[in-house]
Image: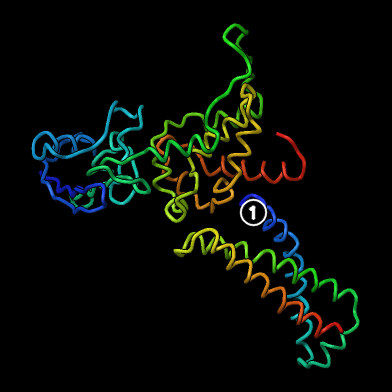
Amino acid sequence: MTTLRVKIWRGNENEEGEFQTFDVPARENQTILDVVTEVQRVQEPGLSYRFACRVGVCGSCAMTVNGKPRWTCRTHINAVAKDGEITIEPLRNMPVIKDLTCDMTEFFQKWQKAGGKFDGTITRKDPVATLPPSDLKRQKADAGIECINCAVCYSACDTVNWDSDYLGPAALNRAWTLVNDERAANRQEVLDKAIGDSGCSSCHSQGNCTAACPVGLSPSQSIHGLKRMSLLSFLGKGI
Amino acid sequence: MDRKLYILQRLTALVLLPLIIGHLIVILYAIKGGLTSAEILGRTQGSLWWGLFYGLFVVSVAVHAPIGLRNILKEWTPLNNQTSSVVSFLFGLLLLILGSKALVGVIF
């Protein structure tokens, strides 16, 4: 194989558009992001896409590749190309700005709606809080803490697709890490938001978020934790 | 609202599970010697226990089913939240009326 056939979505904010096909030289080591960059620099300067770090740290370059949401910088061509063909689209469940670039405003707003803001109990003048790694709550918080807001899980989630008000796996995973963080002053408030309308109880437990997460987190498990806490707090058990 | 309905749906599911198993066992038992209305009514009429069993069953179903229906309507149809809630509430009411009618028929 010497050439890759790449179908890229070219569209505007009104959801109008079509796939444009580019032939790109196949190389030994090549990621999806390399291919998109090559198309933009060599063939189509008007192509819009988003990236920053190129090495799987920032979470900016997520796109839908052959129907699945992925970090394009960490997806090797050989892992996804079928008969030398690749289809690249913007992430699902967010409005498109242009081509492969999505408007993530609502995604981030939902983090706030789910109580994602950290509110501490101490000031910088106090000694640093001691958090024993053996503590069960800390372990639960640690399990979800590595999220970098890339929106891959949000794009993979069918429930977000059906119910646009649903807060989504990333925001609820963030809320779960906060309700288990003993340094957070507003844990009850976060829980109330995460289990409120369009919160964790809307989840169907399909697990698409967990299957798609590039960091290997399990937002699904975090949402289960919130559901359990919701029932327990209803029965009178505090967090 | 969503949270209360979610909890109510789970709690009624807990109530329904043993009731459904009991109901299925009774079906298998009841059809053994042929199924006649006299036999069924002989078992149920005037029975406080069967009255309580199916009374609880009807109430739990009338609460449980519309909550699931509301989610389906919200997610799969163009109906908005309020309309989905109203339609589901009416469906629950229908289940309650039909169930109660059947209950009165076999117990009294």
Front position in the image: A227 or A55: A227
Name the chain letter of the residue that bears numbered label 1.
B
Q: How is the image coloured?
A: rainbow
Furthest toward the left, the residue is A43
Front position in the image: A142 or A178: A178
Quarter assignment of residue B35: bottom right
Quarter assignment of residue A40: top left
Q: Position of residue B92 (x, y in %)?
A: 66, 69
**In what quadrant of the picture does the C terminus of chain A appear?**
top right
Image height of A19 relative to B58, above or below: above
From the viewer's perspective, tell me whether residue B90 is left or right of residue A237: left
Q: Callout 1: helix, strand or loop?
A: helix
The residue that mark 1 highlights is B6
Q: Position of residue A195 (x, y in %)?
A: 61, 43
Looking at the picture, which amino acid does disc 1 mark? Tyr
Q: Position of residue A139 (x, y in %)?
A: 60, 29
Number of labels in the image equals 1
The residue sitting at 78% across, 71% down in the picture is B22
The residue sitting at 61% across, 41% down in the picture is A226
Q: Position of residue A128 (x, y in %)?
A: 60, 11
Image height of B54 relative to A43, above or below: below
Front position in the image: A35 or A148: A148
Quarter assignment of residue B94: bottom right
The residue sitting at 14% across, 40% down in the picture is A26
